[in-house]
Image: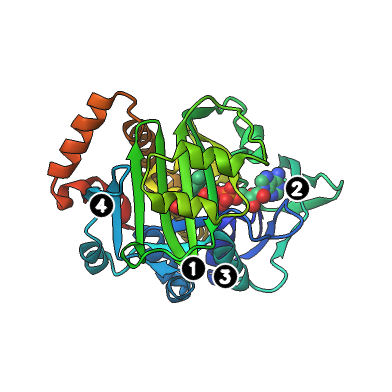
Amino acid sequence: MKCVIIGGGIGGLTTAIALQQKGVEVKVREAAPEIKAIGAGIWMATNAMQIFDRLGLAQRVTAEGISLEKVSITDRQLRILSAMDIPAIKKRYGHSIVAIHRATLQQLLIGSLAPGTLETGKRCESFTEDDAGIRIRYTDQSEEAADLLIGADGIHSVIREQMFPEAKLRYAGQTCWRGVSNHSLEDRFKRSTIEAWGGRYRFGFSEIADDKVYWFAVQATRPGGKDNPGTIKADLLSAYQNFAPTIGRIIHHTSGIIRNDLMDLRPLGQWYLRRICLIGDAAHAATPNMGQGGAQAIEDAWVLADQISRYDQPEQAFRRYQQIRMPKARFVVSNSRRIGSMAHLAKPWAQLVRNGLMKLMPRQLAGSRLHRVWAIDY
Ligand SMILES: Cc1cc2nc3c(=O)[nH]c(=O)nc-3n(C[C@H](O)[C@H](O)[C@H](O)COP(=O)(O)OP(=O)(O)OC[C@H]3O[C@@H](n4cnc5c(N)ncnc54)[C@H](O)[C@@H]3O)c2cc1C
């Protein structure tokens, strides 16, 4: 049985690793001509780390990133409103959250595949399916046969578009700028993630390696805006001038800023059709407010590979994968959206009430909703 995965992102690569460990023949086709050091940083939450543990990758991911000791939501001046009990999380699940450069993670995943598994510069255009199997067509006019097709091609998935043309992306009302700063953080911010909330503006940062700080800046605004490359840094410095000076320093020492309108996917009723199945953002893209999109793709990878290895009939494996994964993935989509709205309350009185409530909330309670996400129960 030959399985082809379209998309060499976190989800596609992890699925390929998990399938190879089960002895399935698998190829990954990635549109990008090469895997480059773009995309800033990412937090690998404790649920992702537990799956990496099962795949034998957790130690290396931890060694190449920064295992966090503190995660806090603060006001503009970095005064804590709410903090996660990281030692308790580590004790319960065996792993903290790891902050890592995306390119480092992607290279580590690629290095864990059998040689020749990944081919870059292959953009899937469409596919056909009949009793004989699946034929995949690429934009370079080449074609390929497969028995199973996995769409891991992200939020703008062409595989999903062909399977479920009625699927809809939803703008979340916020736009995000991201970068990696060559900056040495003060000691009190090392091994931590801080997310500062201030009305229409939000700013998060985290050390991902020595003197490398991943940051994101989120603003409630209209979609489709464009930056002037000559003034983008000055524009962000001006937007965050009322925040703590550390934030200005982080922005100042950055070269290369990425902009994305934050979107999610209106939940699909089904993630598979016959021998074709979706995973990760292609199936259930969420806004990044819980830092869970990548972790959910990694959970998909494990469950899908496990089910494919158990059943002879792909459709049975896909059905079971969907049963196991859909409830948590939907929970993440809806809660991420809700947190995004709460973070950007515009009215000062509403911010005061929210901040007061967050300070009063015990740490255990603040994390209690997240246990549903962090626990792996399969
Ligand atoms: C601002 C921001 C911050 C985030 N922070 C976090 C975080 O801290 N933690 C976390 O867990 N998640 C985070 N996420 C979410 C996370 O990035 C995604 O959920 C995750 O990357 C999804 O992985 P994926 O493999 O499904 O898709 P992707 O990572 O999007 O990978 C899809 C791949 O498919 C390729 N591709 C696309 N079309 C084709 C085609 N036609 N043919 C071949 N290849 C194709 C693309 O080039 C890409 O390499 C964040 C997202 C954003 C926007």
Vertical arrangement, residue 149 with respect to residue 345, above or below: below
For label 1, the residue is 211
Q: Is residue 40 above or below residue 98?
A: above
The quadrant of the rendering that contains the C terminus is: bottom left
Q: Is residue 93 visible?
A: yes
CA neighbours of label 3 inside 10 A, class few (<14), some (14 to 19), many (20+): some
Residue position marked by numbered label 3 in the rendering = 108
Mark 2 vs 4, N-terminal side: 2
Marks 1 and 4: which is nearer the front? 1
Say which residue label 2 marks. Answer: 123
- Looking at the image, is mark 3 or mark 2 earlier in the sequence? 3
Which quarter of the figure has residue 68?
A: bottom left
Residue at mark 2 to residue at mark 4: CA–CA distance? 38 Å
Nearest the viewer among 189 and 152 is 189
Q: Amino acid at mark 4?
A: His
Quadrant (top left, top right, bottom left, bottom right) of the N terminus = bottom right
Pointer 4: what residue? 371
Q: In this rendering, which labeled residue sits more in front, label 3 or label 2? A: 3
Apparent side of residue 44 relative to residue 378 in the rendered image (left or right): right
Q: Residue at x 63, y 52 (%)?
A: 256
Residue 103 x/y as whole percent:
59, 62
Cβ of disc 2 within 8 Å of ligand 1?
yes
Viewer-proximal residue among 53 and 247: 247
Asked if marks 3 and 4 touch (Cβ < 8 Å), the reply is no
| Amino acid at the residue labelled 2 | Arg
Q: CA distance from mark 3 to mark 4?
A: 28 Å
Q: Residue 78: x and y, percent?
A: 30, 49
In space, the residues marked 2 and 1 are separated at their CA atoms by 36 Å
Q: Amino acid at mark 3?
A: Leu
* In contact (CB < 8 Å): disc 1 and disc 3: no
Q: Are marks 2 and 4 in contact (CB under 8 Å)?
A: no
